Amino acid sequence: MTTERAENMEGARTAQDDLVQVKDLQMYFPITAGLFRRRVGDIKAVDGISLNIKRGQTLAIVGESGSGKTTLGRAILRLAKPTGGEIWFDGVNILRLSGRQFMPYRQRMQVIFQDPYSSLHPRMTVGSFVGEPLVVHRLAASKVEYRRRVAELFRSVGLDPAMTGRYPHEFSGGQRQRIGIARALAMQPEFIVADEPVSALDVSVQAQILNLLADLQDQFGLTYMVIAHDLSVVRHIASRVVVMYLGKVMEISSAKELFDDPLHPYTQALMSAVPIPDPRVERARQRQILVGDIPSPANPPSGCVFHTRCPIAIDECRGEAPALRETKPGHWTACIRV
Amino acid sequence: MDRVIEQPLEAAFVARLPREWARAVWRFARLKPLGALGAVLILIAVVAAAFPYVFATHDPARIVAAPFTEPSAEHLLGADYAGRDLWSRTIWGARLSIMVGVLAVFAAITVATFLAIVTAYYGGLVDLLFQRVVDTMMTIPGLVLALFVLVVLGSSLNTLIFTIAIIFVPPQLRTMRSVVLSIKEMPYVDSARAIGASTLRIFARYIFPQLIALYLILGSLIIGTAIIIETSLTFLGLGLPGDVPSWGNLVSRGVRDVFNAGYRLTIPPAIAIGAAVFGFNLLGDALRDVLDPRLRGSGVGLTGRSARFAEQIQSAERGRPS
Amino acid sequence: MGTYVLRRLMLVPLTLFLISLLFFFMLRTIPGDFVDFLFAEEGGSGIGQRITGQTGSAEEEWERLVRERYGLADPIHVQYVRWTSHLATGDLGNSYVNQKPVVDVIRERLPATVQLGIMGLIGSVLLGVPLGIVSARFPESKLDNLVRVLSLGGLTTPAFVIAAVIVVVLSTQFYWVTPDFVPFWEDPVTNLSNIAIPAAVVSFTAAAPIMRLTRSQMLEVLGQDYIRTARAKGLAEGSVFYKHALRNALLPVITLIGLSLDRLIAGSVIVEVVFGVNGIGAALVNAAETRDFPVLQAITLLIGAAVLFANLLVDITYGWIDPRIRYD
Ligand SMILES: Nc1ncnc2c1ncn2[C@@H]1O[C@H](COP(=O)(O)OP(=O)(O)OP(=O)(O)O)[C@@H](O)[C@H]1O
Ligand code: SF4
Ligand SMILES: [Mg+2]
């Protein structure tokens, strides 16, 4: 549903529509050795990524573990300082801003974490945890208003405001994730990065949280960047999808297009790992299994980083890294054989 | 499994009504009878330290009997070489030892916690510098370092407390720092930064509350060691002045008077020291198991298996001159 | 591994340098300097005569002479450089109390302490490891409980209390008098019989943590999967216990033993004083009582260096025994 709405807006694409623009972002972690902590190499966690996120859109980032998804999300939120590139938020390069100048933007972008156990502070009542942003940014004029706002936030994520005095350990995983979402909503942000928001939850709870996220998006006009392992989650909520591998973008397209016609061999491999509900289709389709492990980002393969595991790799793939090309309208692929 | 063990922790931290507190304490006693025994021993020592005049039968500084008077109903443990009542002197000794131990440890852990938060959070050059200084100070056995500092500062009650505090800062700083490093990486700290919380707020609201359990564990574990160091230094004649009724002095004097009074003057203060230290250790062990099962082992973090293991042993064992 | 050892080795001089700085400047944190301090303690002429070896000057004159003699009139960094360069040539200065070269004091006192340390170490291992193993072999048995109480007692009772109680019991029950220390090479029998009891006290206090760690390590290793597999394969219990578990459990114990040097030192300081052993520890306490700063400073440095090298040795041996361990 969200997907269709976003699809319809695809035509009217202008720069003003983009809430977030990432340009050639780089995040290298130094590897040091020896007595003097000499820099002997880099972990290229994010290596030259560009992407745009339109207002009201849900952009999904998918890729195997270690492909740099979390690092990308943290960089966009300025929780980690990138080593190169630009991040534009609503027309402002936020990497240029001082800490003080950035404060108003902090309010406009928030984060939801993967692990509902370690993302809530165990020694804070859930009420004060959710209300903390209101205190930090002085968003409540009085105690009464503060309480009213917290209660409102609890209701908006489907929790009983009577529970504000309890501690996180008294809640289930799904409830904790709702509490985390309530805290993210407290400052009325426009943009939320959700880092694998449901992967730690029971399957039965996953759908509830995803529906909650979709409802909140409709209600508040939120823009999402959702990081996910699981393609069925992506299919459920994303309007556009970025496929990442070893810190680089392999493919970008609308969600529907990507699922109907994945062009990049890596995307195809990821897709074939997702079971298809219809057993006849499942049996008939060709399974393409990814062999081997993801190479180390400290020492990525030359040329196309995927060539060590690509079933259709040829000699040229080792040469130069393939650029992202628009292989179909709105569908970009980084592969010389597409 | 772990949830069961953590229950008293959660219960104690969220308890607000007296009834909830009582229940948390009761659960602790059921789970850790030895820890409860330790708590009782400490309670006795603390009560004696707080109200010595209630339990002492005589003025500890007054000559109230003939020298080396045998124990009697009037003088429960007899009298020392000057004719002062040993029972009363032993009771008053609790006040000095407990006071020195508690104050020194409180100061040391507070400073260590503060430094750990700041250095671990910011990292960089300051952190490196502090680590080197910590390494250096930990190379010298606690008792030897204390001896040196005391000679420089001169012996008095205040310098003794200060000295013991100084030798405890490095090992506690190291333990606290490693814990802060792991807390710093928790998503809730990221979450605090994401809402724009100030660094001070992150320290006070997000990191410090997570250190309270460790603060209590380390505190109760090392108060025993602090008492050992204080009594040892006093025994060697470098801590509290010679005629002050402290346990270290009483034992030292008892040894010197052995040919006049036998072991009668040595054993009671020796038992008092042993019981107090034993109590703090038992409680510390139990608190560690209950509050932070990750630290279980024989000493804080003793069961790790790495090069850091060696350092951890050092920090855990550090400063016990026994 | 190689670079790790190299890094640790290069840290040694740095740490030694920091130790020397620490002590040097700590001595200078005394308000005024230690000459003022000494003069205030015991008046000018006595100390002045002792230090300069002259007689018959006025009170203020003494102060100037002593200060000159120790180079205290120079700026502090000059003093430090001079002190360390003397240190490098093995000149540790002279004792304030009897003008003896500090090097001689140390040379005279070292044998007793080294002997006490070695015997204490051997005793603590012979006591701690077997008891820890037996305790883990029959957990929760009477024997186990006894060992646990013993080790807890050893951990919680200060060495001076144990030493004092032994002294008073021996002297009242057996009219025993603490004997003088005789070097081993002069009279081995007297030497050993004299040092046996002090060494036993040091062993006991150092054995407690070894006992505890051996026990907990054995129990931990016994709970692990490969031991259960070995048991399931029908290996005899004794063989599982001694062949498989023991080897893995003892690794950290070895580290602990290597690191118990500072415990041994602290223990022998006390024990030497109580039993009148003429060693480094007794000299240290004596120097502290008489404010004999050159001796005090030299002994603390010596102890620091010894602990430092022991730690280095442990780290290197540990990495060598267990190559799985990676150093970062
Ligand atoms: N602070 C850091 N220092 C060094 N390396 C890091 C750091 N953070 C991340 N990395 C490395 O960067 C790479 C990408 O990590 P990242 O967590 O972004 O991957 P991810 O796609 O989120 O994986 P996952 O699905 O497991 O969460 C990994 O190889 C990781 O080891
Ligand atoms: S460029 Fe070559 S290696 Fe890379 S995905 Fe395409 S075919 Fe495979
Ligand atoms: Mg991640």
Image: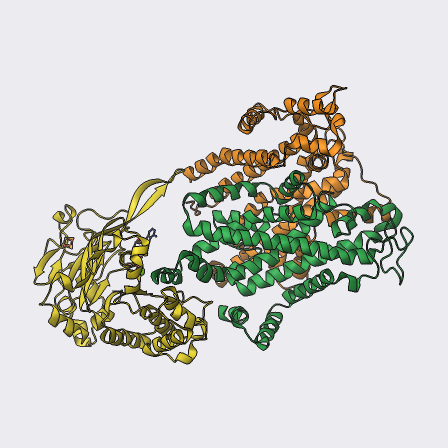
Chain colours: A yellow, B green, C orange
Q: Residue furthest right?
A: B66
- Residue B41: where, in percent of width, then height? 70, 63
- Residue B284: where, in percent of width, then height? 60, 60
**C102 sits left or right of C316 in the view:** right
- Residue C255: where, in percent of width, then height? 55, 46
- Residue in view at x 63 percent, y 62 percent: B283
Q: Quadrant of ligand 3?
A: bottom left
- Residue A214: where, in percent of width, then height? 24, 74
Determine whether C320 is above or below A123 in the image: above
- Residue in view at x 71 percent, y 42 percent: B238
**A116 sits left or right of B130 in the view:** left
Place residue C24 in its image quadrant.
top right
- The image quadrant where one finds the N terminus of chain A is bottom left
**B295 sits left or right of A201 in the view:** right
Place residue A139 in its image quadrant.
bottom left
Residue nearer the viewer, C273 or C60:
C60
Q: What number of labels is visible?
A: 0
**B123 sits left or right of C40 in the view:** left
- Residue B318 can be seen in this image: no
Place residue C295 in its image quadrant.
top right
Determine whether C87 is above or below A79 in the image: above
Determine whether B160 is above or below B205 in the image: above
Q: Residue furthest front?
A: A141
- Residue in view at x 56 percent, y 63 percent: B289
- Residue C12 can be seen in this image: yes
Residue nearer the viewer, A312 or C242:
A312
- The image quadrant where one finds the C terminus of chain A is bottom left
